[in-house]
Image: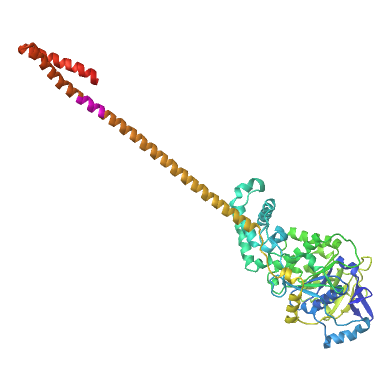
């Protein structure tokens, strides 16, 4: 709750411990073993930021944060805490808060989507669980898509792009380097596996406009609650998606420097999942985002069971800490408790490591930054109870708030616009049609060439036949001419011989006539 413009976190007797909203963008941590009160601390901070007009984002792992939208009520343990802390005098009152419900799968909230392009190759590689070489290949595929102005919106776009790159790998190799088919196949298999976990709902449009979460309602910051009960079953997707949201906030928001209150506060529950199995490049990116997003007025609170889950480079950026009980049942756990205690400015009144092990449920040690950004001495106190309902949210109330939201109409229905898949499909059809046309043209040209060859062959055969016929006729004419010549010559010789008379005359006439006849007819027929 707010008191004098500051967030009242807890009390110890008459002593009160606050968090200055102006220091909230210096980030923070809520830690503690299961059942020690982390959820209550988270709700108290979320309610207080909302009261201060600061939008809040929460990841609801167990499904018990939706009750922020319901009015709190008297319960024995709550009433006892209110009385023991004398909170009525501070203006404590039950309240409900403006909550927008979101769900990647669209089951417990408005669908929350992003696109493949917005996720980018590095974060996507973590979701897919691919190795470094395959990540490099994926980056090349993104670069080719950018160079060719192809939109990568959903998983079918990415699979189509991978197939396109593989089919044309020889053409791309001189500019982008060798692209191994085995790596393409491995990435494709990982995408198909991710689709079985709901990636077809996770990647798509309309994609979340992160600015839609920076809203207020009647002066209170809207609490955007992402239901993660199903999403948490895929830890890499859960953590990567939240990291993407942080990246989007960093890219979208302008630089504001120090301000009286943050533009938004982001609670990252089960924070250890963000760092488990993270590559060196990813850890570097997370650390850089945490460092730089402060200047955009965004505060990040990591919620985890053990502070040791948070890398040192990031822990050093967390100025506001609430530490609930940790249990040490082994030498290693004891070392972890002592390591956690050493991150606080020591309080001479108690041993921090011993206190951490003896904290009751709802009790914590806290250290926050003062107005000058200096960490305060660690203090032991009881955390305030939440002003909203303490328990699970009513499903009917949740459904009513979801469908009554002004954002519901914008995000409820998926849109599948023209992107890489459709473009490459058209290009494939065009290539197929062009290939069919070329094949038809080639077949027609081949048929025409065959027809011309056949016609030429037939013409040559006809010419040869005509020549043979002409020779045959000429030969026939020659034979006829010889026959006629002989007959006519004999008849002519006989006629001449008869004129001369006697047997001599017949012989002479026949010989001379035959010769004369051949000479005359030879001249006529050119035999």
Principal secondary structure, stretch drawn in magenta: helix
Q: Is residue 182 visible?
A: no
Q: Residue furthest bottom?
A: 76
Towards the viewer: 401 or 112: 401
Residue 391: x %, y % from top left: 77, 82
Relative placement, left or right, of 496 versus 454 is left
Q: Position of residue 183 (x, y in %)?
A: 62, 56
Instruction: Point out the image quarter for the N terminus.
Output: bottom right
Figure quadrant of residue 355 = bottom right
Residue positioned most to the left: 502
Count of numbered badges drawn on the protein: 0
- Please say whether residue 479 is one of the residues in the magenta stretch: yes
What residue do we see at 22% from left, 18% from top? 522
Q: In the picture, which quadrant includes the C terminus? A: top left
| Extent of the magenta region | 473-480
Taking the magenta stretch, the answer to whether it contains residue 225 is: no
Residue 80 visible within the image: yes
- The image quadrant that residue 138 belongs to is bottom right
Q: Residue at x 86, y 64 (%)?
A: 297
Q: Which of the 4 image quarters holds residue 216? A: bottom right
User: Residue 435 at x, y = what percent?
Assistant: 53, 49
| Residue 11 x, y percent position in the rendering | 91, 79
Q: Residue at x 57, y 51 (%)?
A: 431
Colour basis: rainbow
Q: Is 495 left or right of 476, judged from the image as shown?
A: left
């Amino acid at each position: 709750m707010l008191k004098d413009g500051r967030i009242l976190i807890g009390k110890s007797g008459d002593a009160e411990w606050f968090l200055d909203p102006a220091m909230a963008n210096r980030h923070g941590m809520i830690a503690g073993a299961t059942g020690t009160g982390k959820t209550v601390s988270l709700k108290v901070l979320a309610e207080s930021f909302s009261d201060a007009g600061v939008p809040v984002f929460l990841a609801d792992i167990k499904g018990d944060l939706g009750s922020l939208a319901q009015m709190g009520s008297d319960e024995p343990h709550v009433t006892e805490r209110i009385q023991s802390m004398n909170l009525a005098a501070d203006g404590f009152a039950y309240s409900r808060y403006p909550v927008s419900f979101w769900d990647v799968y669209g089951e417990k909230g408005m669908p929350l989507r992003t696109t493949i392009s917005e996720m980018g190759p590095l974060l996507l590689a973590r979701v897919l669980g691919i190795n470094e070489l395959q990540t490099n290949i994926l980056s090349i595929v993104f670069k080719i898509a950018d160079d060719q102005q192809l939109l990568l919106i959903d998983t079918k776009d990415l699979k189509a792009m991978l197939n396109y790159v593989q089919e044309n790998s020889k053409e791309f190799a001189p500019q982008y380097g060798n692209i191994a088919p085995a790596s393409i196949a491995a990435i494709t298999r990982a995408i198909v596996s991710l689709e079985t976990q709901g990636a077809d709902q996770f990647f798509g449009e309309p994609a979340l406009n992160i600015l839609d979460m920076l809203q207020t309602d009647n002066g209170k910051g809207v609490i955007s609650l992402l239901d993660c009960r199903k999403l948490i079953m895929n830890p890499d997707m859960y953590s990567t998606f939240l990291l993407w949201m942080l990246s989007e906030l960093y890219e979208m928001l302008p630089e504001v420097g120090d301000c009286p209150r943050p533009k938004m506060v982001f609670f990252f529950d089960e924070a250890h999942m963000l760092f488990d199995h993270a590559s060196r490049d990813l850890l570097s990116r997370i650390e850089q985002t945490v460092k730089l997003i402060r200047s955009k007025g965004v505060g990040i609170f990591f919620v985890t069971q053990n502070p040791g889950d948070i890398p040192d480079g990031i822990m050093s950026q967390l100025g506001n800490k609430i530490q609930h009980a940790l249990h040490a049942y082994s030498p290693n756990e004891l070392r972890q408790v002592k390591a956690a205690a050493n991150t606080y400015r020591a309080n001479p009144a108690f041993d921090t490591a011993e206190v951490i092990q003896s904290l009751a449920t709802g009790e914590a040690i806290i250290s926050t930054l003062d107005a000058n950004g200096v960490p305060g001495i660690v203090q032991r106190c009881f955390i305030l109870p939440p002003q909203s309902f303490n328990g699970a949210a009513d499903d009917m109330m949740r459904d009513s708030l979801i469908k009554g939201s002004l954002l519901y109409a914008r995000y409820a229905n998926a849109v599948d616009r023209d992107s890489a898949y459709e473009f490459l499909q058209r290009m494939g059809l065009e290539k197929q049609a062009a290939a069919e046309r070329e094949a038809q043209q080639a077949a027609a040209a081949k048929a025409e060439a065959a027809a011309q060859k056949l016609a030429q062959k037939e013409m040559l055969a006809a010419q040869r036949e005509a020549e043979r016929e002409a020779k045959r006729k000429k030969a026939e004419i020659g034979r006829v001419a010889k026959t006629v010549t002989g007959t006519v010559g004999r008849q002519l010789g006989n006629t001449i011989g008869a004129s001369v008379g006697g047997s001599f005359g017949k012989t002479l006439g026949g010989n001379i006539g035959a010769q004369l006849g051949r000479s005359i007819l030879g001249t006529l027929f050119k035999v």
